[in-house]
Amino acid sequence: MSGVDTRGGVKLPGRKGQAARNDGLILAAARDVFLEDPKAPVAAVAERAGVGISALYRRYAGKEDLLRKLCHDGLRTFIQEAEDAGGVNDGWEAFTTFLRGIVDADVHSLTVHLAGTFEPTADMMVDAVRANELAGGLVERAHASGRLRRDFAVADVGLLLEACAAIRLPDRERTAQLRRRYLALTLDGMDRDDAGTLPGPAPWQGELNWRWARSQ
């Protein structure tokens, strides 16, 4: 019997393949389960994935480990999308390519939904800094292109993406369509560096971090 390592698409033989397949099923199920109810038990994840609870515990010591894995994967996706977009020559196109990639990847639905439900690791904190640096570079390039409105700040990126992620219908394809629609409308409003001043300042450093304080 062979399986597929969902992280790299490489077929693995025997037990390794089965373990990789189970891990993919567990993570996909966990994403759906915890989006519906962050307080759901890991048993609900195993049931949704169609695997035994022992298979889940062989990979994750408990619910918090699973939550960390899901959110760290989302953070890594954010970084990868930002790095890929950074290779686009035009600053405005690089910025919009990045935003579209993140919206399509549906990163923010889960990470924000699970804020405060686990203790971030040191590696996650390092990646969070890296993600912010990359987003900042893309915003800077978009400003330099002469197209991004002058009062848009890197701190606005997170809430803009959260607004798109808040669109969620039972039909996934329709959800994706509507998210792209409203991102396009938002980008149209941002594509003017001579626009009037926005009401209120952008979020300041650390203003939204309270959401990540561990819930008791």
Image: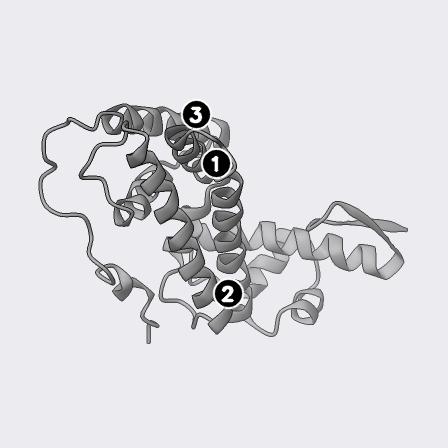
Judging by the rendered image, the residue that carries numbered circle 2 is 68
Number of residues whose C-alpha sits closer than 10 Å to that of mark 2, classed few (under 14), some (14–19) or many (20 or more): some
Q: CA distance from mark 1 to mark 3?
A: 13 Å
Across and down, in percent, residue 155 comes to 27, 50
Across and down, in percent, residue 136 comes to 35, 48
Mark 1 or mark 2, earlier in chain: 2
On screen, residue 202 above or below 147: below
- Residue at the location (56% across, 72% down)? 62
153 lies left or right of 87: left
Q: CA distance from mark 1 to mark 2?
A: 22 Å
Number of residues whose C-alpha sits closer than 10 Å to that of mark 1, classed few (under 14), some (14–19) or many (20 or more): some
Judging by the rendered image, the residue that carries numbered circle 1 is 101
Residue type for callout 2: Arg
- Residue at the location (37% across, 30% down)? 92
- Residue at the location (35% across, 72% down)? 214
Residue 33 in sight here: no
Judging by the rendered image, the residue that carries numbered circle 3 is 177
- Residue at the location (48% across, 58% down)? 71
